[in-house]
Image (cartoon, grey):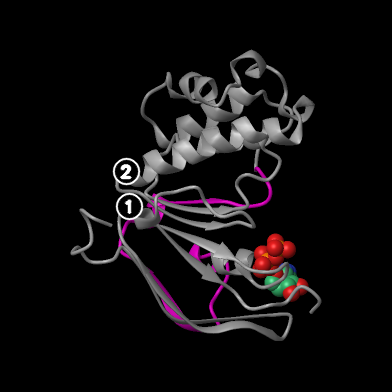
Amino acid sequence: MPSHENAAPLLQVQSLACRRGGRSLFKGLSFELHAGQALELHGANGSGKTSLLRLLAGLMPAAAGAACWQGRPQDVAYLGHLNGLSPDLSALENLRFAQQLVGGDTAAPVAALQDWGMTALATRPVRRLSQGQQRRVALARLGLARQRLWLLDEPCAGLDDAGERLFDARLAAHLADGGLAVVATHQPLRLPADRCRALRLGQAAAC
Ligand SMILES: Nc1ncnc2c1ncn2[C@@H]1O[C@H](COP(=O)(O)OP(=O)(O)OP(=O)(O)O)[C@@H](O)[C@H]1O
């Protein structure tokens, strides 16, 4: 990263190994990420992208090696395949609940839903939103806590073209603000080359 290249990396992964179901998914995995950088994770179904994100989020233990985050633990946001929204609450109620947990600007949930083109649907129960609309709500919530490290699993799943462009803009702004991201994706991220690196995990689709 131009302005952060000489700074110490904020995320350091050293010789990381992961086993699931008695099988080795990867081992000897090492990389570093600086402020303003994203790492895109590629690989076949079952190659271990979600597992790596869960390791980085501290949701499962590594078989060997270490992932060291230099920031505060609460500065890490994980968005998995599931959106983690309360289906009986509206989009706005979900975001207001999330905002109350972190404090800060009480107007932010309304603004976040507006940013994601969800104003007209803000008061509809989440269970009555489409998959793509629910993903938009989850991504709108992601920006509320202003966590520095984003761990995202197929963030654009279900999004239409306009939604993907919104995601591109939000991710670029997050990185420009000194944030970091590790993103499992089957599509290349549309980021400037100096912002983004790629890592491909081993083949495992039929394992
Ligand atoms: N709870 C579990 N217990 C045991 N093995 C699991 C569990 N969850 C996943 N696995 C196995 O771990 C391997 C890696 O799964 P993972 O979800 O990390 O892959 P992925 O690269 O994210 O796949 P996809 O592209 O399909 O989302 C798979 O072979 C899967 O069968």
**Dividing the image into four equal quarters, which quarter contains ligand 1?**
bottom right
Residue 23, percent from left and from top: 70, 85
Lower sequence index among marks 2 and 1: 1
Residue 52 visible: yes
Q: How many numbered callouts?
A: 2
Which residue lies at the image location 42% right of the left edge and 38% below the top edge? Answer: 145
Residue 134, percent from left and from top: 68, 33
Mark 2, Cα crowd under 10 Å, few <14 / some 14-19 / many 20+, is: some
Residue 199, percent from left and from top: 51, 69
Assign the C terminus to one quadrant of the image: bottom right
Mark 1, Cα crowd under 10 Å, few <14 / some 14-19 / many 20+, is: many
Amino acid, disc 2: Ala
Q: Which residues are magenta?
A: 55-83
Q: Secondary structure at mark 2?
A: helix
Note whether 197 is above or below 204 in the view shown. above
Amino acid, disc 1: Gly
Residue 176, percent from left and from top: 32, 43
Question: Residue 69 magenta-drawn?
Answer: yes
Which residue lies at the image location 40% right of the left edge and 73% below the top edge? Answer: 31
Q: Secondary structure at mark 1?
A: loop
Residue 86 visible: no
Which of the numbered marks, if any, corresponds to residue 36? 1
Residue extending furthest toward the front: 193
Answer with the quarter of the image where residue 11 lies. bottom left
Residue located beneath label 2 in the image: 176
Note whether 61 is above or below 191 in the view shown. below
Assign the N terminus to one quadrant of the image: bottom left
Question: Residue 78 magenta-drawn?
Answer: yes
Which residue lies at the image location 64% right of the left edge and 34% below the top edge? Answer: 161
Q: Spatial distance from mark 2 to mark 1, Cα to Cα?
A: 6 Å
Q: Are marks 2 and 1 in contact (CB under 8 Å)?
A: yes
Which residue lies at the image location 39% right of the left edge and 31% below the top edge? Answer: 103
